[in-house]
Image (tube, grey):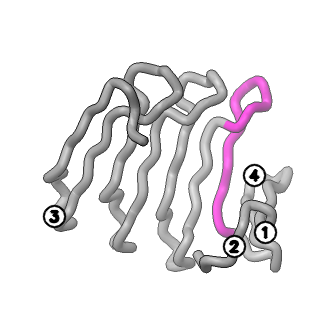
């Protein structure tokens, strides 16, 4: 994603896709049964594989999970979770060497700044 891209450069269409301003599909989204945003997934580098996913797993209006493929290998190296459902991400796991195991796992009950 370019550094000059802002949220206004993208839009959510009724077909479930997320579009760049130029019409390029960059991801998808899903709504819950009440019409609220439940999850998004995007292909930020355009290689055809999902790079980011965020989800509101309990449908309370805040995202409880986030996964990012930081090195474009098709696997999520960074995972963030709100495990106590207070609206802040408080658990993180990072696969620093991209071997499929998380070398760093941190928890902060007050949430990460």
Of circles 2 and 3, the one toward us is 2
Q: Label 4 to label 1, Cα distance in Å?
A: 17 Å
Q: Which residue is mark 2?
A: 5
Looking at this view, is 80 or 29 the one in front? Answer: 80
Q: Residue at x 33, y 61 (%)?
A: 75
Q: Disc number at residue 99? A: 3
Q: Are marks 4 and 3 in contact (CB under 8 Å)?
A: no
Q: Label 3 to label 1, Cα distance in Å?
A: 34 Å
Label 4's element?
Answer: loop
| Residue bounds of the magenta highlight | 26-37
Q: Earlier in the sequence, mark 4 or mark 3?
A: 4
Q: Position of residue 66 (x, y in %)?
A: 46, 45
Q: Earlier in the sequence, mark 3 or mark 1?
A: 1
Q: Is residue 85 left or right of residue 28?
A: left
Q: Residue at x 22, y 57 (%)?
A: 95
Q: Are marks 2 and 1 in contact (CB under 8 Å)?
A: yes
Q: Label 2 to label 3, Cα distance in Å?
A: 31 Å
Q: Is residue 65 left or right of residue 38?
A: left
Q: Label 2 to label 4, Cα distance in Å?
A: 21 Å
Q: Position of residue 26 (x, y in %)?
A: 66, 68
Residue 54 is one of the magenta-drawn residues: no
Label 2's element?
Answer: loop
Looking at this view, is 65 or 87 the one in front? Answer: 87
Q: Which residue is mark 1?
A: 9
Q: Label 2 to label 1, Cα distance in Å?
A: 6 Å
Of circles 4 and 3, the one toward us is 3
Q: Is 18 above or below relative to 85?
A: below
In the rendered picture of this protein, how many numbered marks are placed on residues?
4
Q: Label 4 to label 3, Cα distance in Å?
A: 33 Å
Q: Which residue is mark 4?
A: 16
């Amino acid at each position: 994603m370019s550094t000059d891209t802002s949220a206004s450069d993208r839009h959510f269409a009724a077909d479930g896709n997320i579009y760049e301003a130029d019409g390029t599909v960059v991801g998808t989204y899903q709504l819950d049964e009440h019409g609220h945003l439940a999850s998004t997934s995007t292909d930020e580098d355009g290689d055809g594989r999902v790079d980011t996913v965020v989800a509101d797993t309990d449908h309370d209006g805040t995202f409880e999970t986030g996964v990012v493929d930081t090195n474009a290998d098709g696997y999520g190296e960074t995972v963030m979770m709100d495990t106590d459902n207070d609206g802040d991400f408080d658990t993180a796991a990072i696969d620093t060497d991209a071997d499929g195991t998380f070398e760093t796992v941190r928890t902060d009950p007050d949430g990460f700044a």
